[in-house]
């Protein structure tokens, strides 16, 4: 093999691997919104198949203007700094926005990318209207762990088939 071609392939491979890792390492899988008392809770679930730090940004788009709420990519707006609180785990970032009102309605976005990379990034949007929000307690078990529900449904049909219970 020609040494120049070998070096070009090596460089191309070195540039391609980080790009593939970025697209795989931090893909946002879902963004959900619910109310906890008077606070908005945004659950940003994502894949995490890398050891590199993940940069994130939560934002609100209202009347065609983007407002950064919290994150490591953009500068949060002063009006939201004291109203936001973030909890971060391996594959979920949860943002709380206190004292949520109709003035805070709009399209919320969770965006992720690997540290040191400009693109590509992964994001999800959710449209939030105060009147349409559900309370977090009502959906948290179903969203976080559906295996118990599946087990319950399978068990009921098995118990009914053996005439242990009648529905």
Image: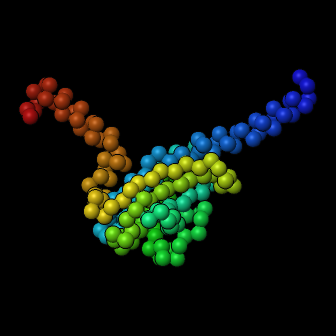
Q: Quadrant of residue 75?
A: bottom right
Q: Quadrant of the N terminus?
A: top right
Q: Is residue 91 visible?
A: no
At horizontal 41% and vertical 54% (from top left) the residue drawn is: 126
Q: Is residue 81 above or below residue 166?
A: below
Q: Residue furthest right?
A: 3
Q: Camera-side residue: 107 or 148? A: 107
Q: Residue furthest top?
A: 1
At horizontal 90% and vertical 31% (from top left) the residue drawn is: 4
Instruction: Point out residue 67 in the picture as x, y percentages from the top left corner.
Output: 50, 67
Instruction: Point out residue 95 in the picture as x, y percentages from the top left corner.
Output: 45, 63
27 lies left or right of 143: right
Q: Is residue 34 visible?
A: yes
38 lies left or right of 44: left
Q: Camera-side residue: 1 or 119? A: 119
Q: Quadrant of the C terminus?
A: top left
95 lies left or right of 133: right
Q: How is the image coloured?
A: rainbow
35 lies left or right of 55: left
Instruction: Point out residue 113 in the picture as x, y percentages from the top left corner.
Output: 60, 52
Q: Residue furthest front?
A: 64
At horizontal 75% and vertical 41% (from top left) the residue drawn is: 15
Figure disc tally: 0
Q: Is residue 99 above or below residue 27?
A: below
Instruction: Point out residue 139 in the picture as x, y percentages from the top left corner.
Output: 29, 52
């Amino acid at each position: 093999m020609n040494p120049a071609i070998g070096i070009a392939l090596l460089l191309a491979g070195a540039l391609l691997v980080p790009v593939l890792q970025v697209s795989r390492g931090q893909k946002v899988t879902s963004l959900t919104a619910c109310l906890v008392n008077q606070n908005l809770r945004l659950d940003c679930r994502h894949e995490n198949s890398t050891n590199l730090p993940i940069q994130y940004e939560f934002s609100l788009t209202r009347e065609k203007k983007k407002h950064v709420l919290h994150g490591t990519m953009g500068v949060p707006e002063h009006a939201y700094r004291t109203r936001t609180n973030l909890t971060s785990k391996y594959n979920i970032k949860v943002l709380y926005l206190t004292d949520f009102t109709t003035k805070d309605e709009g399209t919320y976005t969770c965006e992720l990318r690997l540290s040191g990379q400009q693109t590509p990034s992964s994001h999800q949007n959710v449209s939030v209207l105060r009147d349409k929000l559900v309370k977090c307690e009502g959906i948290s078990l179903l969203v976080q762990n559906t295996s118990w529900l599946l087990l319950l449904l399978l068990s009921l049909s098995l118990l009914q088939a053996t005439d242990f219970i009648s529905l």
